[in-house]
Each structure stands twice: as C-alpha cells, then as structure tokens.
Amino acid sequence: MARIRFEHVEKKYSNGFHAVKDLNLDIQDKEFIVLLGPSGCGKSTTLNMIAGLEDISDGALRFDDEIVNFAPPHRRDVAMVFQSYALYPHKSVFDNIGFGLKMRKVPRDEIERRVREAAGKLEIDHLLDRRPSQLSGGQRQRVALGRAMVREPAAFLMDEPLSNLDAALRISMRAEIKELHRAMQTTFVYVTHDQAEALTLADRIVVMNDGVVQQIGTPDDIYERPKNTFVASFLGNPPINYIDGQIESTDGSTARFRRGDLAFDLPASIAAKLGSSHGREVRLGIRAEDVDETAAGAAGSVIRGKVNSILPVGSDQFLGFDLAGQELFFRVGKDLAHNLGDDVALSVDLNRLHLFDKDSGETLLW
Amino acid sequence: MTDTVSPSGRGRRLRQRFGYDERNAALFLAPVMVVLMGVAVFPILYSLYLSFFRIKLTRPNQTPFVWFDNYTDLFSNELFWVSVWRTVTFSVVSVSAIAVIALLVSLLLNQEFRGRRVLSTILLIPWAIPYVANALMWKWIYDSGYGALNGLLYQLDFIDKYMIWLGDQDKTIFLIANAFVWKEVPLATILLLVSLKAIPADLYQAARVDGANIWQRFFHITLPAMKPGFMLVMIYETMMAIRHFDLFFILTEGGPGDASHVLSWHIYVETFRNLSFGSGAAMSYVLALVTFALSYIFIRTLGRRI
C-alpha cells in the first residue's frame, strides 16, 4: 500500500536534456494513475524515478511520508512490467516469475506456492517449464504480469505493457489489467501513449508534454474539459477541429464567434465565462463527434462545406470536410450517404464547444 | 510446368530437385570447387594415403605399404606423448587466460567512459599483427641480452641480472603461452563484446527492481547471455592453440630440451627434418581428429540449453 508524492521534482540528464520539469503529483493509495503523452514527454522517466531506476535531480519523491529519492529499487517495494516484458531469456517461466522472491530469500516452498497461485490466476500454469522464447507475445505478457504479481508490491508500475500486442489481444488485456487492479487493491502507475488505454483504465490521467504536466484529472475531466489545446488535441479520434476567429459583441450575457462569414452564437454559459473580451483572438475547438446533420440546426450553429473524403470505420464514418480551404474531420453515423464534392451543412452542438486563447492555447472556459 | 510429359517419375523428381536455380548455382560454383579440390581436398586425401606407407626421403626407393603401422608406432613413441602433454599444457594455460582476460576486457569496454573508442582501437592492434611478426617481436622482448623484459624487470629491481628467459625449462611454455595470449585476446574480446552488447538494458532494470545486486545480475543475466560467445571463443582458441606452430618455430624450436616440444612442432620435425612423410602424415591425422573431437565435446556441453 503506498501513496506516492512528487514535490517539485526535476530530472536533468548530464547531456543537458531536461526530461521532467517541476513535477507535482499526489498519487493516492490504491489509485490507478495513467501517465499519458507522446514519446519523449517524460512519462517513462517519471515511472523510472518511482522505480528507482533513474536518479532525481531535484525535489522530493515520497512513498507515504518517507523520502525515497536515494533508495535503491529493491528497497522501494515496487514491481514493474516493461514494454519489452524483459523476461530473463535463460530462465524457465517458473524461475522468471519467482526470481524476485528468490532474490528476497523467500523460502522455496513459499515461492512455489505463490508462483503457482499467480500462474493459475493468469492461466499460464501449464507453461511453467517453458522458456520465454517458446511463448507467444500474449503469454510473455502474462509472465511479466505474474512476475510483478507474486511480489505483492506496494505499487505496480507498468511501462507501455500492451504496446507489443496485436489489437484484439490489447483490448482483452486491458480488461484483465483493470480486473487485476481491482483484485490486488494496490497502487498502479501506468505509462502509455494510447489515449484509449488511458481513458479505459485510469482513475486519474496525467497528461504530459515536453516534461511538463499539462493536466491532471479523471478521464472525463481530461476529455470534456481540456485545459489547453495540447490536451484537447491529444485525446479524441479523429482529433478535435480548430477554427481561429474573434469574439464579437460580448456584454457578459451574449457572445458571438466569427470568422469571415462563419458565425456561432455562443450559449450563455460560455458567454458568461468570457466576460468582456470583445475582439479577442480565439481558437474554437469542435470535437469530431459534436456535430449532427439530421437535426435542423438553429441559425448561428451551422457550418457549411464540401465533402473532401469519406473514411468508413465500421460503426461510423469519418467525414473530411472542406471549410473555406481548411480541412476538418467529423465523425458521423454511417447511414448518412454522401458523395465526394457534395455540399453539406452540419449543425454544431454549441454546448460542447471548446474555446482557447489563440496565443497561449489555454482554455477560456474552466 | 512442362513436367507433364516426363518419361519417368524418377526423372521428374530429379529435375524438380535440381531445377534451373540449382543448375545455375552449380555452374557458377564449379570453378572454385575445382580450385578447392586441387588445394584442399586432394592434399587431405593424399596425406591420408601417405600415412599408410613408410616413406623416408632418405630411402626414396623403399616405400612399403604398412597398413596402420605409422599410427601404432606413434603411440609407442615416448616423444610423441611428451609432445601431447606439452600441447595440453600450452592449450589449457593459454585458452583459460584468453577467456578470463577477454571477459574482463569486454566488460570494461562495455562501460561508457571517456576514451573508450580510442582504447578499443589500441586493444585491436595485436590482432592485426601477423603471427610470425608477433613471434619475432616476442623473441626480441624475451632476449637474454637486449630484451625489453630483462630491461624492464632489471630497472624495476625485480631481477639483479639479465635472465635467459626462454632457456628456462620450467618457464618456456608459459612465456610462449603469454605471447600467444597477447595476440589472441583482441579477437576473443570482440566476440564476447558482441554478446554483451546484445543484452537488452531493461533486463538489468527488471533485475534491479526484482532485488538482484550487481553480482546476482552478473551471474543471472550477463553470464548466461555470454554463453554463445564463450563457446565460440573456447572452440576457436582451443583449435588455434593445439595447432599453433609459429611461436614454437621462431622462439624455441621445441627447446630447451623438449620443454616446448608440442605436437605441431613434433609433426614438423618428423616430416621436414627427419623427412619421414608417412609417419608425419599419420600424426597430422591424429591432430586433426583430436581437434575435431574437442570441438564436438565443446559444442555438446556448452551448446546445450542455449
């Protein structure tokens, strides 16, 4: 059981690369935290700092109340699952799973019992005599999970554990990891660049970019109330669409967004937050799914353009949409029949609009 | 595609097995096969043939066919057994030294430090030196009158007079082994370094999280991963050591006495000094068979579980 706290933590490498900048994060006991971001954003470095595999340049890392900046990995009572699984190639599955216990001088019969128990839960008990090279990707993944499970650690660290699996297996393993978290009742810190994994698994998501935390929040917070354009763009498939323009006629209760002859009457809830920002340059964000064609859109919420591309994705279709030279992508029902070059009018769900400052990219709404 | 009219099943099978590609390949390989027949296969078979005759160039008219006498005589020859013993000593000492030193050097070169590339390049120099040049160099170093070894030890006060190093029966074989080790370590180091470089870094990270200390990481991850490299080094260096000739020829000519009278030197003396080609050929065959048997044993014992 562990609460993990980063207080103003910095990570600088000797070559001058500043991997993590002023990280403040309070991970609750038994929480499932997902660190999400593009490669090189510092998420794996953060995980390695928790594991003790990377030194901390500045600040404090606490497990419960104890500062562990200088504690070696084996004193931290954490277990880790690596992207490559990092199974010991010369050891059997049994010895791979039991290695951590053996190093901790757990009695032989206790190791035997715990390895068989974990293998049973993961349904790999028939593979215990095999070597990693004789296993499929999914089986290796289970061995790696088993190696972490038998340790019964205070925190479970996972570095992109599913990224080497094929798509179908990835989805079923997601469910198993979620179940594992429920069963083990321990803190999970999970690193991924896959937004779907983050949204399905996390209690809270930490979005990182360039070593800086962009936003910390529940999956709902992150998706519905992104703090800046980076977070808004990183989640969503296809990504959120932006239209740059200006705020007109704000008197605190009504507001209008305009770019050229495109104009939206912003709802009162949004207008109230804008205050007096007449003439302000803003970036309007429309999530791909927040449009509808069938509803007869009220005036001031309609967007017109030409169909540029049609990408069916099974249940839905992605519509490439040409708005005065700018390409937008929307997700619409597949029963809507369109041909390339058709003129279409889509009605935008104004209550779900996002507004960002054009220069800073920070949200104007929350 | 045109097989349907083939006269017999056998003809068709043959044609399928030796199709167009195979016939072309055979055509292109033919010239080199002819050359190899002339310079490798023929001498090998001819020396086997010779080993069944008593051939002494001093009695060119008497070359009786003697069946296996050359082989049986060999095993009752006392000097032959001395040479076997010398060869074993030389090989065991030099191969173990090569393995240990190459292991340490490869572990060192696997670390990141300033000047690593320069050091690696310098360490390769002995490898680039021809065997004969290496032997001549060590002859100078070991020389009793002007040798660098004497000079160094004398100036450091380890010895109070110049020594005739290669004249000392107890030391000769080890001094020659030293020269051999110096020449062979670079290659062995590279072979081991390759297997070291192939170990993924996250294995070590996983082991650290699992609580393995630096020694446990070495024994549970590094050593097992180096096994294929080690096997290669052991086989190659053993084969080089038991057949080695140049150093013995240039440094000691088998002496003093029989102190460095190894098998390859014994074969040389028998064949080219005693001009006894039949028994020389028989000994060569024995040496080849021993080399072959040793490699087989190495592969069976070390190669298992890889």
Image (spheres, coloured by chain):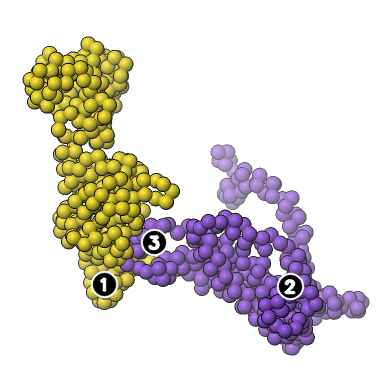
Chain colours: A yellow, B purple
Name the residue: 31% across, 53% down.
A58
Instruction: Kindly identify the amino acid type of the residue bearing the numbered disc 3.
Output: Tyr
Horizontal side of residue A262 vs B157, given as left or right:
left
To which residue does mark 3 refer? B204
Horizontal side of residue A359 vs A84, given as left or right:
left
To which residue does mark 2 refer? B148
SS assignment at label 1: helix
Which disc is residue A86 wearing? none
User: Which quarter of the picture shows residue B162?
Assistant: bottom right
Instruction: Kindly identify the amino acid type of the residue bearing the numbered disc 1.
Output: Ile
Name the residue: 57% across, 61% down.
B190
Name the residue: 18% across, 28% down.
A364
Q: Local crowd at mark 2 within 10 Å, few (<14), some, or many (≥20)?
A: some
Tell me the chain of label 2.
B
* Whether residue A180 is situated above or below residue A238 in the rendered picture: below
Tell me the chain of label 3.
B
Task: Answer whether labels 2 and 3 touch (C-beta < 8 Å).
Answer: no
* Residue A256 point in image, percent of width and height: 15, 17
> Could you give the CA–CA distance between mark 1 and mark 2, rounded to whole angstroms?
60 Å
To which residue does mark 1 refer? A111
Which is more foreground, mark 3 or mark 1? Answer: 3
Name the residue: 69% across, 72% down.
B179
Which is more foreground, mark 2 or mark 3? Answer: 2
Residue A304 in sight from this viewpoint? no
Horizontal side of residue B146 vs A98, given as left or right:
right
* Whether residue B298 is situated above or below residue A207 in the rendered picture: below
Q: Local crowd at mark 3 within 10 Å, few (<14), some, or many (≥20)?
A: many
Tell me the chain of label 1.
A
Q: Earlier in the sequence, mark 2 or mark 3?
A: 2
